[in-house]
Image (cartoon, rainbow, N blue to C red):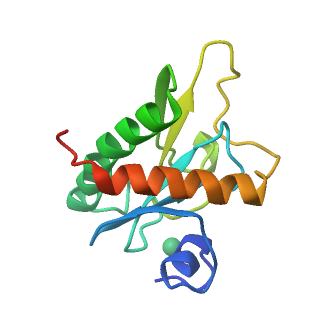
Amino acid sequence: MNDDCIFCQILNERAPCYAVHETRYTKTFLDIFPATPGHCLIVTKDHYQDIFEATPDAISMVGHVSTLIAHVVKEELQSEGVGIFQLNGAAAGQTVFHYHMHVIPRNTGEDLTIHNRMPGDPAELEALAARLSTRAYSMRVDD
Ligand SMILES: [Zn+2]
């Protein structure tokens, strides 16, 4: 764990998040600067800076959970598509240096951004997290 890392602070419950789903190895919560409503982040519970530090097992767990979360956002939010992004290094656009994967609901005509400068509305984020969490725990990965 890294005291200066916002994702470690969330994992240690020293910072709040809009939680969607949790496994032994991963935690999924809403990006508070959503590219689109329902933009989720899946993070490893251990602190790895990026793909070059993370273990293959940790990365595969995130990938496994991403299939569940992709179904969850597509079905709950009726998005036409789902973007899955994983960025490593500032040059690639990584902004939090703790391994994570973006799951972003997409619809035709939207800008294909990953990071938004505008924070989401707290009440909207809370309501979305509740909907997505209920859906996530009602589904199995292989549903
Ligand atoms: Zn961390």
Hey, which quadrant is residue 142 in on the image?
Answer: top left
- Residue at 24 percent of width and 51 percent of height: 60
For the residue pair 83 and 81, the one nearer the viewer reads as: 81
Image location of residue 50, percent across then percent down: 45, 57
Q: Confirm whether residue 31 shows in the render.
A: no
- Residue at 25 percent of width and 56 percent of height: 61
Hey, which quadrant is residue 134 in on the image?
Answer: bottom left
For the residue pair 124 and 97, the one nearer the viewer reads as: 124
For the residue pair 109 and 8, the one nearer the viewer reads as: 109
| Quadrant in which the C terminus is drawn | top left
Q: Is residue 130 left or right of residue 55?
A: right
Image location of residue 73, percent across then percent down: 46, 38
Q: How many marks?
A: 0
Q: Confirm whether residue 2 shows in the render.
A: yes
Up-down: is 85 above or below 25?
Answer: above
Up-down: is 15 above or below 71?
Answer: below
Residue extending furthest toward the top: 109
- Residue at 60 percent of width and 69 percent of height: 17
- Residue at 54 percent of width and 84 percent of height: 13
For the residue pair 1 and 34, the one nearer the viewer reads as: 34
Image location of residue 118, percent across then percent down: 82, 47
Q: Is residue 69 left or right of residue 85?
A: left
Residue extending furthest toward the left: 142
Image location of residue 88, percent across then percent down: 50, 48
